[in-house]
Structure formats: structure tokens, C-alpha cells
């Protein structure tokens, strides 16, 4: 059950490539800064289910980018960014 939580070097490079290509205005909308940290792990957004926690429900895997100055956080769909493939989206997928 050993599981890697951090992105591999290759995944991190894909993430950076995607951001460099698509993210044209890197000025932070909150503080007008422009230094960002890409978190080395993915996060997930779970579908709201009336307040119930549903294991195995639909998820959006997210790449998280945080402004180094103010902490404003943006999230990019990790599948769209090419960091993970759609099949690997979740182990409990059952739709
Ligand atoms: Zn900021």
C-alpha cells in the first residue's frame, strides 16, 4: 500500500509546461504580485452531496498554485494540465 503523494519530476515538469503555455497574465488578482508556488502534491475537489461524505464519489483532481505574497490560491484541473491521465483519476471510480 505504498503510495506516492508527491508529483513525480515528470509530472511537475508537465504542470510547469502547461502553466507557462496557458497562463498568460501571472499577476495575482489579490495583491498584484507575480511570484507563485506550485504545490508538489495534487488536491481534490469533491462533489457536494448534501453535506454527506461519499467515498468514491466524483472528484476533480487539482493542481494548486499559490501566490507567495498573499496566499491567494488558484486551482487547475490536473487532467486538463496533462499531469494525470483520465483513467488514473480515482481508484474508486464507479460510474
Ligand atoms: Zn497575491
Image (cartoon, grey):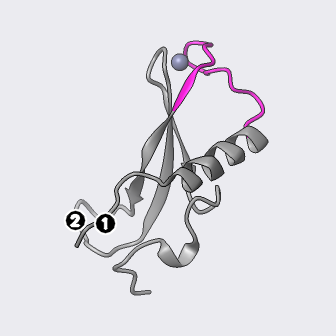
Residue 50 figure quarter: bottom left
Q: Which mark is residue 25?
A: none
Distance from the alpha carbon under mark 2 to that under mark 1: 7 Å
Q: Nearer the viewer, residue 95 or 84?
A: 84
Asked if disc 2 and disc 1 are in contact, CB closer than 8 Å, the reply is yes
How packed mark 2 is, by other alpha carbons closer than 10 Å (few <14, some 14-19, many 20 or more), is few
* Residue 90 relative to residue 2: left or right: right
Q: What residue is pinned by disc 2?
A: 53
Residue occupying image coordinates x 44% and y 23%: 71
Q: Position of residue 72 (x, y in %)?
A: 48, 26
Q: Nearer the viewer, residue 20 or 72?
A: 20
Q: Position of residue 66 (x, y in %)?
A: 49, 30
**The C terminus is located in which quarter?**
bottom left
Vertical comparison of 10 with 84: above or below: above
The residue drawn where x is 60% and y is 13% is 33
Tell me where residue 46 sits by quadrant: bottom left
Density class for disc 1 (Cα within 10 Å; few <14, some 14-19, many ≥20) is few
Q: Nearer the viewer, mark 2 or mark 1?
A: 2
Q: Is residue 28 above or below residue 50?
A: above
Q: Which residue is mark 1?
A: 49
Q: Is residue 56 left or right of residue 32?
A: left
Instruction: Give percent across and percent down for residue 16.
Output: 64, 42
Quarter of the N terminus within the rendering: bottom left
Residue 85 colored in magenta in the image: no
Residue 77 visible within the image:
no
* Magenta residue span: 23-37
Magenta span: chief secondary structure: loop
| Residue 30 is inside the magenta segment | yes
SS assignment at label 1: loop
Amino acid at each position: 500500500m505504498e503510495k506516492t503523494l508527491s508529483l513525480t519530476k515528470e509530472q511537475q515538469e508537465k504542470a510547469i509546461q502547461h502553466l507557462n503555455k496557458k497562463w498568460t497574465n501571472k499577476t495575482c488578482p489579490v495583491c498584484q504580485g507575480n511570484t507563485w508556488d506550485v504545490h508538489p502534491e495534487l488536491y481534490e475537489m469533491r462533489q457536494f452531496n448534501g453535506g454527506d461524505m461519499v467515498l468514491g464519489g466524483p472528484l476533480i483532481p487539482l493542481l494548486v498554485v499559490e501566490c507567495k505574497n498573499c496566499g491567494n490560491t488558484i486551482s487547475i484541473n490536473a487532467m486538463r494540465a496533462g499531469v494525470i491521465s483520465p483513467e488514473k483519476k480515482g481508484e474508486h471510480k464507479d460510474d
